[in-house]
Image (spheres, helix red, strand yellow):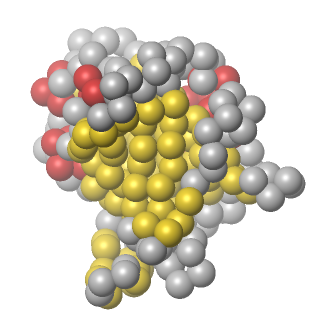
Amino acid sequence: MKKFLILMTCLVLSACAERYREADSGRSASEVEGLVAELRSRGTLNDSGNGAAALDLAGQQKAVIYFAESNNSGKAPMGPIHTVTPLNFQDLGIDIYPSQIEYIRVYFLEALEESGRRDYALILDIKKIGDTTAQAYAFINDGQTNQEPEATVEEGLFRVSFPSANGETLYLESDDILDGGELGNVIQLKAYVLDQQGQEFSAGQISSLIGYF
C-alpha cells in the first residue's frame, strides 16, 4: 500500500450521470496501516475459515485498501454507525445490531496477482459494547479459498461475490467506476445475499469507503 492518502473528493462517472462522492475517514494512510497491522496481529477471524487468507491479502503491499470507520460517540468523521454501515448484519451471519456496536471498521481489499487475477476481501472489524476486544469477520474471493469467478464490470457496475460456508453468497456492487473500468477513489458498496433457495435480497450497504493506494 502506498504511503499517501488519495484525494478525499473525486468525480465518479456512472452510466447515467456525473456525480461527486465525498468522504473523510479522519485517518491518515499510516494510521490505516497501523489498524491493519493490529488486525493481523490478532490472528484468525470469526469467518468459517476465510480469515487467514483475508489477513494475508491485507498484508500485501500491492493491496488497495478501501476503508470506513464509525463509532457510537456521535463524533465519528464519517458519521454514525447506522449511516456509515446500514447493514443487516444477521443476513451476513453476524449476530449483532447497530445499537450494540461500540465501533466498526470496514476494510475492502483488492489485489492484482501476478497471474492477472484480482483477489478481493471484505473484513468487518466490530467491537461490541462491553466487550474487551473487537471481533472481525471476513469474506474472500481469491481463487484459492473458493472457485467463484473474480469481479466483473458490466455497463458501469462492479460486482464481486463471496461464498459462505452455509451455502449462501454475498454480493457487493458499486457503480462508482472510472472511465477505465477501475473503482473510484471513494466508493459505495451495496450488499446482496443469494440464499440457498436461489433468492437474492438486499442486505444494506456500506455508504462510503475511502481508497488508500
Image x and y of residue 24, in percent:
34, 63
The residue at the point 40 percent across, 55 percent down is 173
Q: Is residue 145 above or below residue 12?
A: above
Image x and y of residue 185, in percent:
48, 70
Residue 56 occupies quadrant: top right
Residue 128 occupies quadrant: top left
Q: Nearer the viewer, residue 47 or 209?
A: 47
Residue 130 occupies quadrant: top left
Q: State the count of labels.
A: 0
Q: Is residue 71 above or below residue 190?
A: above
Q: Is residue 118 above or below residue 98?
A: below
Can see residue 205?
A: yes
The residue at the point 22 percent across, 33 percent down is 88
Residue at the top extreme of this rendering: 131
Image x and y of residue 192, in percent:
33, 42
Q: Is residue 148 above or below residue 127?
A: below
The residue at the point 28 percent across, 55 percent down is 207
The residue at the point 67 percent across, 35 percent down is 147
Q: Is residue 68 left or right of residue 81?
A: right
